[in-house]
Image (tube, grey):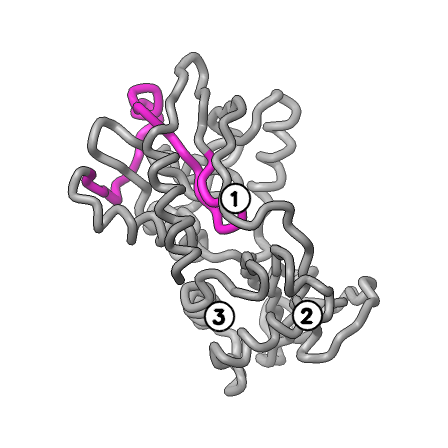
């Protein structure tokens, strides 16, 4: 059952040629994990969505309070009989039909869907996980690249490239030739006691799990967090590389080209994130 502006439908064929999200990528989305009815990191998701809508110059309805969004997510999870399970919830917001590149209608429609997830808490996956750089196309630095919008062509083409080359993932590069992120999450690099992640101005996604990791690291005196550009040359010198997103949590990278990596810091951080989820 899909929630469309508060009304439920089991009809998945809702797209029209005039839909601006389909025609022009004039749409945003949030992917949220719901654990037995508990919406994880709802504040962060809500404020990112609101900030993204402002950047896209969308008309934010007065009803779009955090309590309203939370209630609509809960209703959607309940309608899909997932209150006693873990669910992957997707909120999509698109500007309503009208106009060409220039919208003639500033109002928006929201769609919320939910699917079951296998695991409750975040698990550490220790299988081989190999990545390489995707160098066919580049990310443009700036705020638009930080949004979860429908403009994800580079992620689609990069995912096909990864599959064709027997890779588990690819790392994206921006036009300044710095490593920005993975195809499906933010990147962290560990070198001794320093942990680096690219700054938002490099064009990486303003990830919810990225922020959770930053919050945890700020409380750990043994590690120094640095938000700095990462050169491709740094990757093979790292002790650890890992990818973060709100559905998987932390995915350690085990191999980049000829370099093998450990997962000691990934394991420690994942434990702390799970504690945060349990207590939050």
Q: Quadrant of residue 78?
A: bottom right
Residue 172 x %, y %: 46, 36
Mark 3 secondary-structure assignment: helix
The residue under label 2 is 78
Name above or below for residue 102 compared with residue 224.
below
The residue under label 3 is 53
Q: Residue at x 62, y 21 (%)?
A: 166
**Lateral position of residue 45 relative to residue 3, left or right:** left
Q: Is residue 210 magenta?
A: no
Q: CA distance from mark 2 to mark 3?
A: 27 Å
Q: Which residues are magenta?
A: 223-251
Return the residue nearer the eye: 33 or 131.
33
In the rendering, which numbered label is found on residue 260?
none
Question: Dot 2 surroundings within 10 Å: few (below 14), some, or many (20 or more)?
Answer: some
The residue under label 1 is 248
Residue 32 x %, y %: 54, 59
Residue 49 x %, y %: 48, 67
């Amino acid at each position: 059952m899909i929630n469309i502006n508060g009304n439920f439908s089991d009809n998945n064929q809702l797209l029209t040629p005039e839909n601006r999200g389909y025609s022009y990528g004039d749409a945003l989305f949030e992917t949220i994990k719901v654990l037995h009815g508990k919406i994880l990191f709802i504040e962060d998701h809500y404020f990112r969505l609101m900030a993204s809508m402002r950047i896209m110059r969308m008309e934010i309805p007065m009803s779009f309070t955090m309590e309203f969004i939370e209630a609509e997510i809960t209703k959607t999870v309940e309608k899909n009989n997932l209150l006693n399970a873990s669910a992957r919830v997707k909120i999509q917001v698109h500007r309503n039909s009208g106009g060409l590149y220039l919208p003639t209608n500033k109002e928006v429609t929201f769609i919320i869907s939910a699917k079951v997830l296998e695991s409750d808490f975040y698990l550490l996956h220790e299988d081989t996980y190999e990545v390489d750089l995707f160098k066919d196309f580049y990310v443009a630095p700036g705020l638009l690249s930080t949004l979860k919008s429908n403009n994800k062509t580079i992620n689609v083409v990069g995912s096909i490239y990864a599959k064709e080359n027997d890779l588990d993932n690819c790392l994206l590069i921006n036009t300044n030739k710095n490593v920005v992120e993975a195809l499906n999450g933010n990147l962290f690099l560990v070198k001794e006691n320093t942990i680096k992640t690219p700054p938002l101005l490099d064009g990486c996604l303003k990830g919810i799990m990225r922020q959770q990791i930053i919050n945890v690291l700020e409380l750990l005196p043994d590690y120094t967090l640095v938000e700095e550009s990462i050169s491709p040359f740094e990757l093979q010198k790292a002790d650890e590389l890992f990818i973060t997103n709100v559905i998987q949590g932390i995915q350690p990278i085990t191999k980049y080209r000829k370099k093998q990596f450990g997962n000691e810091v990934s394991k420690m951080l994942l434990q702390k994130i799970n504690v945060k989820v349990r207590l939050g």
